[in-house]
Amino acid sequence: MIEPTMHHDYFAEKSFSHDWTSTHIPKWQRLFKAIKNRDLEILEIGSFEGLSAVFFLSFFKRSKICCVDTFAGSKEHVTSGSEYEADMSSVESRFDKNLAPFGSRLEKLKGLSIEILPKLRREGRTFGLVYVDGDHQAASSFADASLAWQILETGGIMILDDYVWMPDRPAADRPQAGIDAFLGSIEGQFEELRRGYQIIIRKTPSQARLAGSDLFGSRPQEIMTGGAVELTLAGRLRAALKKFGKR
């Protein structure tokens, strides 16, 4: 087990095997200072052992969080010898234990984001803060961000994680091209608050509607076929992948 590299007060008596999050906390604290006392509904896509969820619930003391995860891990978590390799058999139980003290402030939804997010939309759910940190495939990053955008409140904030993760990997196997395609699809509908390892944006008032905003609703599994995205906005993703094709 490891201890997060900073902010031990948030993580006392918690158990984590990896820490990919705590280095972002100082930036989040500064950026979110003005809204820390709001009644905030948070959506997290990709929770792993709950480190970021613990921070959000501790920092935003009047918040609730909806955590979406398969708890099966991504390719890098189950590849032997990977620096991200993890014992996925214990990840979910560690998440449950770490978040147990927060009681009803936590809503855990186990399953695929491409199935759960459209369901949340059909239920009329909206969120003031969305953290996109799911599967690292470009197609998955694009789909998660696009689906989550539909249920992000106007004025709400979205954190897009891992923008420059593993730059030597093929473009299809990392988030950057997917994030670029997503941002291109919502041009004029957001304010960029921060750009670095994470991109953080605020949804601005707009009459424009995200192109293809209903295309995930009935058959979400169709958004991926053989590693490609099969949707109206697929052209944006293909263009972004082509841009990074030789990198």
Image (cartoon, rainbow, N blue to C red):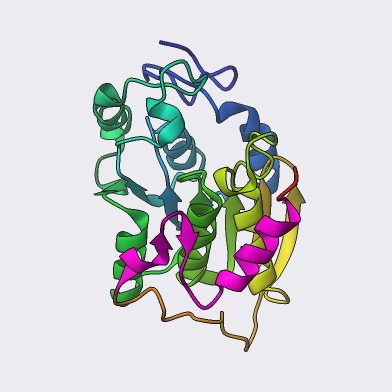
Estimate the x, y position of residue 197 in percent, counting from the top left: 70, 40
Is residue 95 depicted above or below 110 in this figure? above
**84 or 195: nearer the eye?**
84
Question: Residue at point 36% right, 60% down?
Answer: 114
User: What's drawn in magenta, residue-wise?
Assistant: 219-244
- In the displayed structure image, the side of residue 15 where residue 84 appears, left or right: right
Q: Quadrant of the C terminus?
A: top right
Is residue 120 depicted above or below 159 in this figure? below
Instruction: Look at the image and say whether residue 232 sits in the magenta stretch.
Output: yes
Question: Residue at point 34% right, 76% down?
Answer: 217
Question: Residue at point 32% right, 27% down?
Answer: 98
Estimate the x, y position of residue 168 in percent, counting from the top left: 69, 34
Estimate the x, y position of residue 245 in percent, counting from the top left: 71, 50
Is residue 5 depicted above or below 228 in this figure? above
Q: In this figure, what is the number of numbered marks?
A: 0
Estimate the x, y position of residue 53 in percent, counting from the top left: 43, 39
Instruction: Look at the image and say whether residue 98 sits in the magenta stretch.
Output: no
**166 or 161: nearer the eye?**
166
Tell me if residue 38 can be seen: no
Q: Quadrant of the N terminus?
A: top left
Tell me if residue 102 can be seen: yes
User: Which residue in the rendered view is the most extreme toward the bottom?
Assistant: 207
- In the displayed structure image, the side of residue 151 where residue 115 appears, left or right: left
Is residue 124 depicted above or below 201 in this figure? below
